[in-house]
Amino acid sequence: MFDLVNGLPLHPLVVHAVVVLLPLAALGTLAIAVQPAWRARYGVLVVACAALAVVFIPIATSSGEALEERVGDPGLHAELGDQLLWFALPLLVLAAGLVWLDRRGAATSPSRSEGGVTWGGASAALRVVTVLAVLSAAAASVQVYRVGDSGARAAWGDQVTSGGTSGAADAAGDGD
């Protein structure tokens, strides 16, 4: 199903949505975790980015499997890509939890801090979710890097050398 679009493999096209949205969601989650005042303003946007990333990951995975049938096994890249959803889902849940707990706290508390991280008035649940959200954002960011690096190595590892010349072009006599 997720194979070609206008004759081009879908995977390298759709993977860019994941590469942009998931790190953006991770950075946004970090921002709303350390700046409680930003949760009301940017929280829904962060959750939307995380949700879109979660939607695009299975499309990237399926299109990657279709591409694998055409070009061969990408090795570690496929394995790491299959794991990415399990980093994105907790990020989505924790970002949504931050926003929800913040709104719930705002509804029950007449005064809110507009500064940075404040633990004094925060509920224990909000504290735990904040710490877990920061850890999840870091883990998701690292995993996106690992998937992308292994994908780049699988696609380009034997074609581009550190000298900047293409091994395939040199072999064909096109490198001069």
Image (cartoon, rainbow, N blue to C red):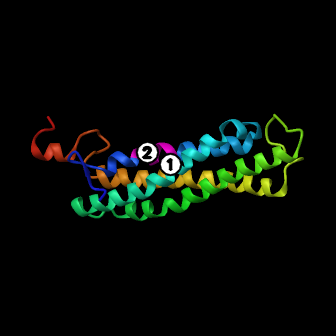
Residue type, mark 1 in image? Leu
Is residue 94 a member of the stretch shown in magenta? no
User: Is 12 left or right of 107, judged from the image as shown?
Assistant: left
Q: Quadrant of residue 65?
A: bottom left
Q: Tell me the residue that label 1 is attached to.
A: 52
Is the residue marked by circle 1 packed among few (<14), some (14-19), or many (20+) residues within 10 Å?
Answer: some
Check contact, mark 2 vs mark 1: CB within 8 A: yes
- Is residue 160 visible in the rendered image? The answer is yes
Q: Which mark is residue 17?
A: 2
Q: Position of residue 1 (x, y in %)?
A: 29, 59
Q: For mark 2, does the 10 Å Cα neighbourhood hold few (<14), some (14 to 19), or many (20 or more) residues?
A: some
Q: What label sits on residue 79 in the rendered view?
A: none
Give, as a single range, the part of the protein colored magenta.
16-21
Which residue is at a point 55% across and 42% down the rendered structure image?
A: 24
How far separated are the C-alphas under marks 2 and 1?
9 Å
Residue at the extreme front of the image, as rendered:
107
Q: Secondary structure at mark 1?
A: helix
Q: Residue furthest left?
A: 173
Q: Residue visible at 71% across and 45% down?
A: 33
Most common SS among magenta residues = helix
